[in-house]
């Protein structure tokens, strides 16, 4: 069954300028007043019906951003290192030109990210990942990843890890994702497409930031 196409925006409504009333009010004035008010309320009814209908989400324009990296990322042993993004997949009020995921609008945001971890050392290794907001460590944000030893001299161990946080952000606040290692053979890797069966490439890092709600009053 065909459906009517969505318009790409709601119709802005502005309180109408009501006609001046003669004294005493006459029939023509009342008809003009009713027409003006009817048109105004019809616009309001149309917008409300569109928003609460089954396709109402098409009109909502909340901030969001999605970013990724397709380069191998390495770190100096026991050194806080930023995860970097060089690909902007989507951006609407959330940007990440390099490592700082920055929001234009205050609100509660959902940050989600994943990393493709690799260990080429012949022993189990740990990787630490944590968050900073405006350059300050976020208490409780550290994740500890345990990676198994490599499978062979040229066959590293692999694991993909990801999690999400709700963040309270003011306008122009930024979040950075940091990581550290205890052995240089622990890296965050990108992988090329492969066959049998055909599989697409793997990003080394993926992160998204999406608006959830206005800040509590």
Image (cartoon, rainbow, N blue to C red):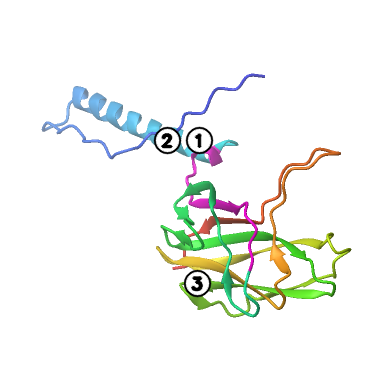
Give whichever of discs 2 and 3 has the lower sequence position. 2
Disc 1 packing (10 Å; few <14; some 14–19; many ≥20)? some
Question: SS for tag 2?
Answer: loop
Left or right relative to 106: residue 119: right
Q: Which residue is mark 1?
A: 50
Front residue of 184/30: it is 184
Asked which quadrant contains residue 42, the reply is: top left
Q: Which mark is residue 168?
A: none
The one nearer the camera, 204 or 60, is 204
Question: In the image, what residue occupies the spot 70% across and 58% down?
Answer: 189
- Residue identifier under label 2: 10
Residue 89 to residue 28: above or below: below
Report x, y in % for residue 67.
56, 52
Circle 1/circle 3 CB separation < 8 Å = no
Residue that label 3 marks: 133
The quadrant the N terminus occupies is top right
Q: Position of residue 3 (x, y in %)?
A: 60, 22
Specify the segment rendered in magenta. 56-74
What separation in Å lies between label 2 and label 3 (alpha carbons)?
36 Å
Q: Is residue 39 above or below residue 53?
A: above
- Give the side of residue 95 with respect to residue 123, left or right: left
């Amino acid at each position: 069954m065909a459906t009517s196409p969505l318009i790409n925006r709601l119709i802005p409504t502005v309180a109408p300028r009501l006609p001046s009333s003669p004294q005493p009010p006459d029939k023509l004035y009342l008809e003009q007043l009713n027409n003006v008010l009817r048109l105004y309320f019809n616009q309001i009814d149309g917008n409300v019906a569109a928003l609460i209908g089954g396709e109402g989400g098409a009109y909502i324009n909340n901030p969001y951003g999605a970013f990724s990296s397709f380069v191998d990322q390495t770190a100096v042993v026991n050194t806080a290192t930023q995860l970097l993004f060089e690909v902007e997949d989507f951006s609407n009020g959330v940007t990440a030109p390099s490592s700082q995921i920055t929001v234009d609008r205050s609100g509660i945001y959902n940050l989600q990210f994943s990393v493709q971890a690799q260990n080429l050392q012949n022993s189990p290794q740990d990787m630490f990942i944590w968050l900073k907001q405006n350059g300050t460590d976020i208490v409780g944000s550290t994740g500890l990843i345990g990676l198994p030893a490599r499978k062979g001299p040229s066959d590293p161990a692999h694991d993909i890890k990801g999690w999400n946080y709700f963040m309270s952000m003011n306008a122009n606040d930024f979040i950075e994702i940091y990581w550290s290692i205890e052995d240089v053979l622990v890296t965050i890797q990108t992988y090329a497409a492969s066959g049998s069966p055909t599989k697409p490439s793997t990003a080394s890092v993926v992160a998204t930031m999406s608006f959830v709600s206005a800040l509590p009053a």
